Structures are given as structure tokens and as C-alpha cells.
Image (cartoon, grey):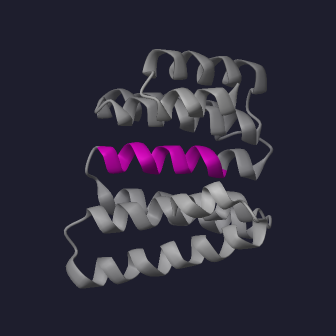
Amino acid sequence: LMELAEIKLTSAKYRSAMSLALDAWGLLGNQVKGASAVRLAVRVYLEQGRFREASQMAEQHWSFFKTSSDPRARGMLMVALADATAGLERFQEAVTLASSAADIFGKVRDREGQAAALKAAAEANLSSDGGTTKAKKALVAAESALELVRGLKDFREEASI
């Protein structure tokens, strides 16, 4: 379901992508893959410019995931929150959320999750009006994410960074 939802999102078939992402979340619950499904649903809203709905969805699901016994699930939901927060142009808050998620993933040695969090931090830094300092921070985060992904041999994810 997740792969098909990603394809639908890439093809701008938003209704289908949302439906598939929510179906995946329904099946996966508060596991890390369930959090990834919620993040995908948040991204569907963001792609449509529906920033408030993206934020509401991430915040509603945070109450479900914040008590998850799997730190990776909490971390991935924090990345979804970071994505949604950046959509609302609250870039520093987004960087803080993404950096906290990267720390969580680093502690449990989840390179893929850590790369996703670092990429979110880089995007938020780059979108902010922080000039050269923020651009340098974005570059450092993006390079770190790229290094992590290269170790995974995930060429599609590597190309997206």
C-alpha cells in the first residue's frame, strides 16, 4: 500500500494517495511503518498546499504515537510534525522537531529514519530566512542524510536528497 501511495502522490493523484496512506496506517497502527503512513498522508496535504490540514493530521496522530513503545515510531511522527510545521512556515520549530527525531533514530541506530529526519531539518533550514548560517546548516544536514542513505544502498532515496 505504501509504495502504491507514493506512486499516486508522485502522479498527483492525491485522493488515491491519501486513501492508500490511511488504509496503510489502519493496518500498521502505532508501529514505525504506521507512522510512515501518517507522514505520507501529511505529505499529500502538503503537496496540495493544505498546510493547516497537514498540521492538524500530524498533531492528532501525535497523541496516538507519543506513547508508542517503539522510539522509531515516535521519531517518524516527529518528522511528520516537522514537515507540517515547515508547511506553516514555522521553520525553527520544524528544525527542532526534525533534529530531535534524528537524535532518536541515531540512538536506536535506524539510519533510514535518521536520514529522513536530517533531510526534513535541511529542508526547513533552507526554507527559512536565515541567510548563510541556515544555508550552511541545511548543507551539513543534507550531507549527513546523504551519507546515511548511501550506506543503505537505497538509490531512490539517495536521489531525493
Q: Is residue 99 magenta?
A: no
Percent from the top left, x then y, of residue 7? 57, 32
Q: Residue at x 46, y 28 (%)?
A: 57
Residue 19 location, quadrant: top right
Q: Quadrant of residue 159?
A: bottom right
For the stretch drawn in magenta, the main secondary structure is helix
Give the residue displayed 68% in from the left and 67% down from the top: 149
In the rendered structure, the answer to whether residue 71 lies left or right of residue 142 reads: right
Give 135 or 160, whichever is nearer the viewer. 160
Please provide percent x and percent y for residue 101: 59, 59
Front-most of residues 123 and 156: 156
Is 40 positioned to the left or the right of 128 in the image? right
Note whether residue 65 is visible. no
Could one spot residue 143 in this view of the protein? yes
In the shown orientation, is residue 30 left or right of residue 118? Answer: right
Report if residue 77 lies within the magenta region.
yes
- Viewer-nearest residue: 147 or 8: 8
Q: State the extent of the magenta-drawn residues as a range.
A: 75-87
Above or below: residue 106 compared with residue 87: below
In the depicted structure, whether residue 158 falls above or below residue 130: above
Q: Position of residue 146 (x, y in %)?
A: 59, 72
**In the picture shown, does residue 14 fall above or below 66?**
above
